[in-house]
Amino acid sequence: MLIVYDTETTELAGHPAIGLSVACVWRSTLDRYDFYSQRRIVELLSLLNAGSLIAGFCNTTFDNPLLTRLSGRRLTAQVYDLYAEIVRVVGRGRAGWSLAAISRAMLPVHQHKTGDGAEAPGLFRRGELDKLYSYALGDVQTTVAVLRAVVLAGGVVSNGTDKIRVNVARIAPYFRRQMT
């Protein structure tokens, strides 16, 4: 089972009191989206560790370490990070490879990434949970759509300016099963 997920936090990255406001998860076997709060973090880690592959965008540098720190448990599932694959090709520090830019270049307008994760802590503090959950869901839906588009394009990723080829061998089987 492929699991694509993203986390939203209670504070901006780097804040010492950062917590999990919500995680949104998509499972390939169910083609369904679920939400997990800080109270359900152990359940979330159990689900992620049950996956044969977990995927995301910047999950190896942000989401995975966040969950490990907050739960005290290690992620043991295999990991695919589209951003890490892009960095392997273009190098660190090269601008223009955000999920928003890639979604604008590769997806129909109705699937473009909207909003900014930096707004999530404010939504959480103000109790605007419907907007927070909507943003989190949209982020994971966009990530799933981008991953699917990259697999269909044979590993080609575009940000609207440049095109590169990344390794999709580990995620391709999950999307190919869905497309047949």
Image (cartoon, rainbow, N blue to C red):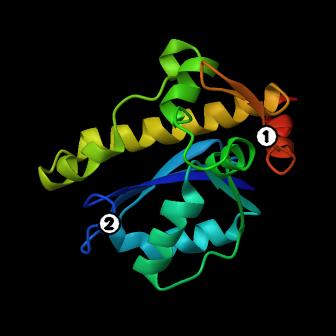
For the residue labelled by badge 1, is the local secondary structure a helix, a strand or a loop?
loop
- Identified at 71% across, 64% down, the residue is 51
User: Could you tell me which quadrant the N terminus lies in?
Assistant: bottom right
Q: Which residue is mark 1?
A: 166
Q: Position of residue 103 (x, y in %)?
A: 56, 26
Q: Quadrant of residue 11?
A: bottom left
- Identified at 48% across, 30% down, the residue is 100
Mark 1 residue type: Val
Q: Which residue is mark 2?
A: 14
Q: Position of residue 64 (x, y in %)?
A: 54, 67
> Is 89 placed left or right of 180 in the picture?
left
Q: Position of residue 8 (x, y in %)?
A: 37, 54
> Is 179 placed left or right of 67 in the picture?
right
How many numbered circles does the render carry? 2
Above or below, comparing residue 109 to residue 169 in the picture: above
Residue lying farthest to the bottom in this orientation: 72
Give the Cα separation between the discs numbered 1 and 2. 29 Å
Label 2 packing within 10 angstroms: few (<14), some (14-19), many (20+): few
User: Could you tell me which quadrant the C terminus lies in?
Assistant: top right
Choose between 165 and 129: the one closer to the eye: 165
